[in-house]
Amino acid sequence: MNIRLPSRLAPLALMCSAFASHAAPVLVTQNPWSQNRDVTHFTQVFGADNYSLLTSYASVTAGAIFNATNRFVMLEGGANTDAALNGFLNSHASAITNWVNHGGALLIQSAGWTSDVNFLGATLDWGNSANSCGTLTADGVAAFTTGTRQCGSYLAHDVVLGLGMTTFMTGDTNGKAIVAGFEQGAGYVMLSGLTNSQFHYQGDSLINSVISFTAKQSDRNAVPEPTALLLAGSGLLGLVLTSRRARRA
């Protein structure tokens, strides 16, 4: 049986359809320091098998991940994978920027060895001194569920340079941002100079918090969560039945 919805309900039906098409989070990492710690973080934050994993920038098709069905992508470029990450960003800057502008949340993380990483006027600068420790700013304390001051060997290599960003963590060695982000169009970009978590004395919590917070930024312009859609669907059904009764009266 086909039910023709009143025209005023069409946007809700489109939102339901859009929600159903949204894919899982995407991680692109070439396992810096020969470790798969990024996979550990995504499993802890999103659950096993609830994300897509790509392990080579050379084989990534930008259109396959930066499209309307995906809302959160993390690009890792630590250790000797920094040049590969920067090359990927340069080659696909237009497509990635367009995706972010339309509501995507992007986390770029690099504690590199040889190359700066650049995107939309922001830079992960590897040439500054590394930071053994870092301290959350007031914004960082509000955003992350992790210790306010953390150390490692090293906690971060790169610092984040650029104007108009919110700084979430600064390095104790040089006082510069090591985690910072900014709104871009309807989306969000976070830059992190943190090393792999095996070098963090407090373990996984800091990077897990960065991932979780950045992923949630896509919710600012996302379709409703399943519970909201269920409630909206109940209201939609009620409106349909009310419309039918009105026609019978």
Image: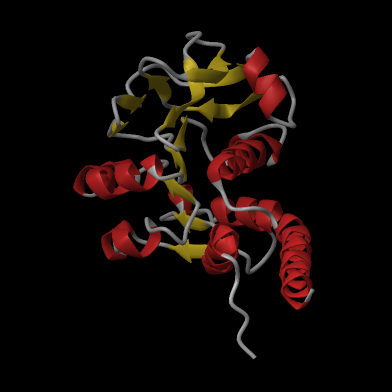
Residue at 74% in and 64% down? 239
The percent coordinates of residue 171 (x first, y second) are 54, 16
Return the residue nearer the eye: 90 or 205: 90
Scheme of colours in the image? secondary structure
Query: Does residue 245 appear left or right of residue 61 in this picture?
Result: right
Seen in the picture, residue 175 relative to 204 is either above or below; the reply is above
The percent coordinates of residue 178 (x first, y second) are 50, 22
Query: Does residue 157 appear left or right of residue 149 in this picture?
Result: left
Q: Quadrant of residue 242?
A: bottom right
The percent coordinates of residue 240 (x first, y second) are 71, 70
Q: Residue furthest front?
A: 249
Seen in the picture, residue 180 relative to 28 is either above or below; the reply is above
The percent coordinates of residue 249 (x first, y second) are 79, 73
The N terminus is located in which quarter?
Answer: bottom right
Query: Does residue 41 appear left or right of residue 89 in this picture?
Result: right
Return the residue nearer the eye: 99 or 143: 99
Q: Quadrant of residue 54?
A: bottom left
Seen in the picture, residue 163 relative to 227 is either above or below; the reply is above
Residue at 42% in and 21% down? 159
Return the residue nearer the eye: 60 or 171: 60
Residue at 41% in and 22% down? 160
Residue at 71% in and 22% down? 142
Q: Is residue 17 visible?
A: yes
Q: Is residue 19 visible?
A: no
- Could you tell me how many numbered marks the image carries? 0
Q: Residue furthest left?
A: 91
Q: Residue furthest bottom?
A: 1
